[in-house]
Amino acid sequence: MSTELLHYTSYAAFCSIISGEHLRFTNIGFLNDAMEYQYEICLFIQAIEEFENKSNIQDRFDTSLISRFTFLNQLYTVSFCENGDDLNLWRGYSPKEGGIAIGFDNETVFSSKNVLINKCQYGNPYKDIIVPSNYQRIRHKFSNIEAPSKDFGHIKFTFDLAHVKSQSFAAENEWRGVVIGINHKTNYLVKNSMIVPYMDLKYNRKSIKEILIGPSAHQNRIKEALELMTKQFHISCNVVKSEIPFVQY
């Protein structure tokens, strides 16, 4: 069953997304929480070490292999969420002058099979999954990798890691699109005194099901402009206004 996923953004970014038919994927090491992916890797390594301690395993697995072969500097991600018209998300992901949330169909937003889009897991999903059979499989996998980018099982494992987040963010109900940056052009922008690597990847305009205008004193005029834009780019979707009373958020 398809799910409508919202991408919260600014007016300027929205215009670029619609006109260019691209979504921006940010290098996972340069998100607002720069240590987020490291945290996910550490959870997995911790689960392995706890299993080894509990099982009294003397010949320890070299866990540095996990950090070495998890595409640490090559993963790029774009965020969506299930929450529509959420004041906390307007505040967190749109500028003060206002924003827009684009509602995409999760099954058709990307035609490329290289992009994996899934719901994030919150907390520690690895706590109880390291059992003898899994442990041996993991050791074998990471000890015999020659070309990680061509190993489907390894890629899936890496993408699963990229969908794990701290429990403190659970209220966002985030989904992520994840891709390996190999064979894609990398661009750079300046944000919050940082230089951030990103990639623009094509999406399907026909996957847009709704455009939600955030709290603003100018919602009616913005709605008129968006209806002209959707007509120009042949986008058949609902253009609706946030029901949150206007506040200077």
Image (cartoon, rainbow, N blue to C red):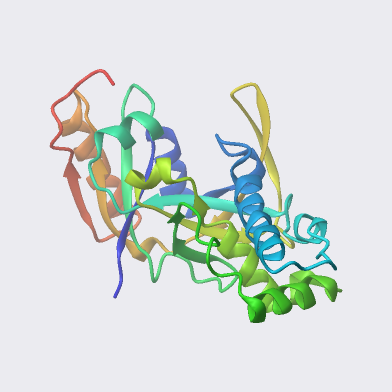
Q: Residue at x 13, y 27 (%)?
A: 245
Q: Nearer the viewer, residue 190 or 120?
A: 120
Q: Quadrant of the N terminus?
A: bottom left
Residue 219 placement, left or right of 115: left
Residue 141 x %, y %: 76, 76
Residue 67 placement, left or right of 117: right
Residue 117 placement, left or right of 100: right
Q: Is residue 137 above or below residue 238?
A: below
Q: Quadrant of residue 160?
A: bottom right
Instruction: Return the residue found at the far bottom.
Output: 133
Res. 147 visible in picture: yes
Q: Nearer the viewer, residue 60 or 144?
A: 60
Q: Nearer the viewer, residue 12 or 61?
A: 61
Q: Residue at x 43, y 46 (%)?
A: 167
Q: Is residue 21 above or below residue 95?
A: below
Residue 138 x %, y %: 71, 73
Residue 15 x %, y %: 41, 41
